[in-house]
Amino acid sequence: MVLSEMKGGHTKASPRSSDGMKEARAKYHHSVEPTRALERDGDIVVSARLSGDFPNSPLSVEHIFKLKGGKITSMEIR
């Protein structure tokens, strides 16, 4: 995923990020199954099981969302 930092601390995904996601889905045939959601340090954290045609599948990952005014300002996957 290609991200660009913008003024005010916002991050914007470039068009290449969408293409990259499509290529990854075609190559790895992956799926993401949310397993829990919680609030941590003001962020929304969604834990998920990521499985597909790649080494060490399945993996546990966290999607970390930052919100402002009820809108997502950034998302990070760890």
Image (cartoon, rainbow, N blue to C red):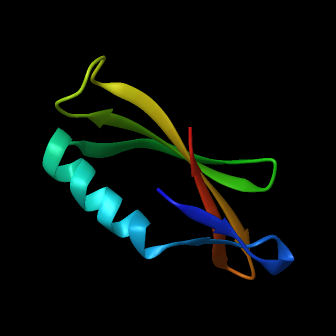
Residue depicted at x 64% and y 79%: 71
* Left or right of residue 70: residue 36: left
Hey, which quadrant is residue 18 in on the image?
bottom left
Percent of width and height locating residue 35: 40, 39
The answer to whether any part of residue 29 appears in the image is no
Depth check: give the residue in front, 61 or 9: 9
Specify the quadrant that holds the C terminus: top right
Tell me what residue is drawn at x 47 percent, y 35 percent.
Answer: 61
Residue 34 placement: quadrant: top left
Q: Is residue 64 above or below residue 9?
A: above
Provide residue 1's location: percent of width, then percent of height. 46, 56
- Tell which of 15 and 38 is nearer to you: 15
Q: Is residue 65 visible?
A: yes
Q: Residue at x 42, y 75 (%)?
A: 15
Above or below, comparing residue 35 to residue 60 in the picture: below
Q: Is residue 75 left or right of residue 66?
A: left
In percent of the image, x 19 and y 39: which residue is there?
A: 28
Q: Position of residue 63 (x, y in %)?
A: 53, 48
Residue 42 falls in which quadrant of the image?
bottom right
